[in-house]
Every structure is written in structure tokens, then in C-alpha cells.
Amino acid sequence: MRIALRSALVLAALGAASAAFAAPKDPTGTWLTEDGRAKVRIDRCGPSASNICGKVVWLKTPTAPGGGPRTDLKNPDPKKRNRPVIGLTLLDNLQPEEAKFSGEIYNAEEGKMYSVSLERESASELNISGCLLKVLCGSQTWNRVPDVNQQAAMTATDPKAAAKPAVKAAPQAEPED
């Protein structure tokens, strides 16, 4: 009887411990940054797709003042300053750690890397916490949005975005004899 009771307690303790160290909630999807200026697509990557990576897929202002695409102007590596921001990887191989993913995030506006952790608060919110030199820290909440290709499909089927009736063609001149 004591052995059975002990076994049950050990199994219960192991179950509680494994629940406490559960894998983080899946953050894959497209997220709108807190300031609304960019959308970042997060996907699985790395060994056995256990890590996450994220890249910019949309910018509110995609063009630079000169008319060309926005580029990674503040990158400390001069060779990388002409890279377009759309398509730029910001999160590279963040690893699962308890209930979150941790690693580094690249801030193209400053050309700096920050320590970061991502934790999904709900199905529609992602908490981003980052630090520079473990002293200057901040956090923000990103909101889930439809994938960019889904947004295009939604716009195409939106009745307000439907094509207007074709303009009548101008009358053709009658041929001369």
C-alpha cells in the first residue's frame, strides 16, 4: 500500500513538474508591431523546426524619401546597408525556453541587436520583451493579423474594393468612303 501511494505521489509530482516546464505557445503567424509600422511573419526554423525566425513582410511606409524601397541604412556593416527592409530577418533561431522563446532581435531603425523573449499572451497577442546590455529594457505587445497573402485575398473580395463598371467606349468614327 505504501509503495502504491509513493508511486502515485511521484507520478503526480512528475506531472506537475512537466506542466510547469511546458513548451511555449506557438507564436507562428503574422504580427503587427505595437506602433503599427511593420508586420513580421514568424515561422518555425532550426533543428527539427523547434526554433522560431521572423522577417518583415509589410511596412506602413515601404519607400524611402527618394522613392526606392526602405533599406537597412543604419546597419553597422556597410555592406548590408542596401538590403531592403521588407524581407529582412529580425528574429533568427530564437530557442524555446520554459514558456517563451529567447534569443536576439535586430532593430533596423537603430542597426542594433537586442536580447529578446517572445511569449504568446493569447491567440491574438504576442509579448515582446527586450534589453540592450541587460540594462535598457522595454516591452511591447504585437497583435496577430491575417497573413499578407490573406489580406490581399480579403481586399480582392471586399465589396467596397470591387471593380467599378467599365467606362463606355467613345463612339468610333465612321469609315470614310
Image (spheres, rainbow, N blue to C red):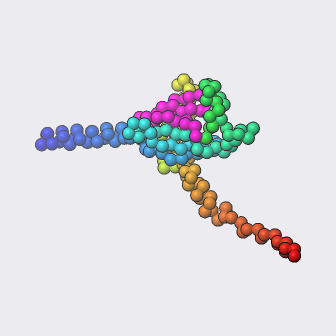
Rendering quarter of residue 50: top left
Task: Name the residue nearer the viewer: 166 or 97.
Answer: 166
In the rendered image, the quadrant that contains the N terminus is: top left
Residue at coordinates 72% horizontally, 69% vertically from top-left? 165
Q: Is residue 85 left or right of residue 96?
A: right
Main SS of the magenta segment? strand
Q: Residue 72 at x, y = what percent?
A: 63, 33
Rendering quarter of residue 34: top right
What stretch of residues is rendered in magenta? 87-116
Q: Residue furthest left?
A: 1
Query: Could you tell me if residue 109 is visible in this image?
Result: no
Rendering quarter of residue 169: bottom right
Q: Is residue 82 magenta?
A: no
Q: Is residue 102 magenta?
A: yes
Q: Residue 104 at x, y = what percent?
A: 51, 31
Residue at coordinates 56% horizontally, 43% vertically from top-left? 40
Residue at coordinates 61% horizontally, 41% vertically from top-left? 86
